[in-house]
Image (tube, helix red, strand yellow):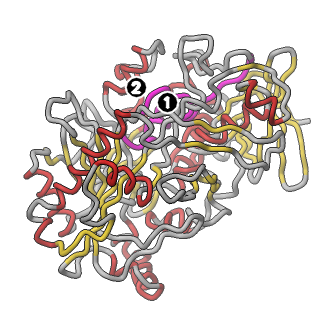
Amino acid sequence: MSTFDYVVVGAGSAGCVLAHRLSADPRTSVLLIEAGGRDTTPLIRMPKGFGKLLGDPRFAWHYPVEPVGPTGRVEHWVRGRTLGGSSSVNGMVYNRGDRADYDELERLGNPGWGWDTMLPIFRRIEDHALGASELRGTGGPLHISTAPGPEPLCEEAIAAGTALGWRRTDDLNASDDERIGYTTATIKNGRRFSAARAFLRPVADRPNLTVALDTVVTRVLTEQGRAVGVRTRSGSREADVRARREVILSAGGIATPKILQLSGIGPASVLKPAGVDVLVDSPHVGGRMREHRCFVVQYRLKDDLGYNKALSTPLRQALTAARYLATRRGPLAAPAFDVIAFFKTRPELARPDAQLLIAPVSLSPEVPGKETRVEREPGVMGLGYILRPTAEGNLHITSADPEAPLTITPNYYGSEHDRTVGTALFRRMRELFETVPIADRITAETLPGSETRDDREIIDAGLEHGRCGYHAIGTCAMGPAETDVVDPELRVRGVQGLRVVDCSVLPTMVSGNLNGPIMAMAWRAADLVLGTG
């Protein structure tokens, strides 16, 4: 049986950072376990390649969720299944969240997670193309960039935003006011800069770091109340791995609570019916889940602008790919959304409560488990979501069999706050596209359609035509109470030697996308594990 000092489960945004940090001491042995394979496909390096990766089970997990919306729509939550995890298949948006988000973590009883602690970490990990400042870092392992040049449709969308009073900025992370600008992204020279590329690849040759690929962790092994290792499955072969110091779960907001529940750590009311012996009756494992639900609007354009022409057919995609390979520029070198805005749904608010992402492209209806397809006629789209939703969903195992499906209940718009903010957000999104100069380019709203007007219709449209943000948090939330899954140092209550380091530990949502925040939190967590912070 193999034995290591640390066993890290999941080579995603958090796991790659942990492997980087924990293996820095050559006397410390680290095993990083990844359920997927290597991140060598060219589609990972090509930023817009993620559209094809998301539908491929070799590179992404597809978790069906409970039906949503008035027609009982079935959708799948997608997560990365390769080195780099979701950072290898995501839209590459780099948002850090607001100062108040991190200070809220401390206010809730989690010392050491405030903005004064986290900002220096962000600056340390960043290599920002805009250069160093009091709020940005350079020379770090993670490259951050903005758009290499203006795009006509994007310029007009930004101009419409400034007409609404939103400040144009080159660095969307440099303030917490209403603002609009080109997306800050984990892209360098037209190539994706995943967590694996930033943190794992530079240290892959360390003799004390072992990476196990195509290996699924099915449970945590415990002895006398202490985590001593994990059980793994690779194909039909099972094996146990021991950990001298700690087992660290970094499998994400879905897989981490699943592993805990399969290990007997979770609500007794879930574990017993599933046939799992209760080791620790931890009532909130898999609960308190919050997720971004994106409203989608799409518009038909008068003129042949944007990316549809370049991406809508296999032949056009091939020509665009050839241009990309020759220049590392063009639509395939861009993040999922070219422009981002943060804005208030009510003027009296202290800070923005909504985010809008804009792309000069429009998509055909989504088919679960299939690659994203682009419409042939020119179009533009916007995705908007409530930055800090309050509705809580949950997920739980249905069997002791690790391959059995989960039950995932999103509970989108399940609070009055979310319904009120959501309808205001949707109307504000429309207002932007009805503002010149972008309004002069539009002939019609194609999704959800101009007939969608009252509050109920707007919420139904968000459920029926919207999309998951892929930002589920809270399923192993940290906190000071004995019923919180992990303590402020991310140690699992009831089991020694076991920690959770991923987005599941967040008790409240960060204002924006999660990839950047989770890498910074993992850097901070490594200090806690090593006793240096």
- Give the x, y percent position of residue 158: 16, 56
Q: Which residue is mark 1?
A: 521
Question: Helix, strand, or loop for circle 1?
Answer: helix
Circle 1 residues within 10 Å: few <14, some 14–19, many ≥20? many
The residue sitting at 50% across, 33% down in the picture is: 392
The residue sitting at 42% across, 39% down in the picture is: 140
* Viewer-proximal residue among 223 and 466: 466
- Give the x, y percent position of residue 60: 62, 58
Q: Is residue 106 magenta?
A: no
Q: Is residue 374 left or right of residue 480?
A: left
* Viewer-proximal residue among 327 and 106: 106
Which residue is at the far bottom? 315
Q: Pointer 2 and pointer 1: residues touching (CB < 8 Å)?
A: yes
Residue type at tag 2: Met
Q: Which residues are magenta?
A: 495-521
Residue type at tag 1: Met
Q: Is residue 452 left or right of residue 161?
A: right
Q: Which residue is mark 2?
A: 118
Circle 2 residues within 10 Å: few <14, some 14–19, many ≥20? many
Q: Quadrant of the N terminus?
A: top right
* Viewer-proximal residue among 29 and 491: 491
Q: CA distance from mark 2 to mark 1?
A: 8 Å
- Give the x, y percent position of residue 200: 59, 45
Camera sees residue 30: yes
Identify the image quadrant of residue 312.
bottom left
The residue sitting at 21% across, 63% down in the picture is: 154
Q: Is residue 116 left or right of residue 403?
A: left
Identify the image quadrant of residue 119.
top left
Figure check: 503 above or below 371: above
Q: Return the mark for residue 384.
A: none
Question: Helix, strand, or loop for circle 2?
Answer: helix
Figure check: 291 above or below 271: below
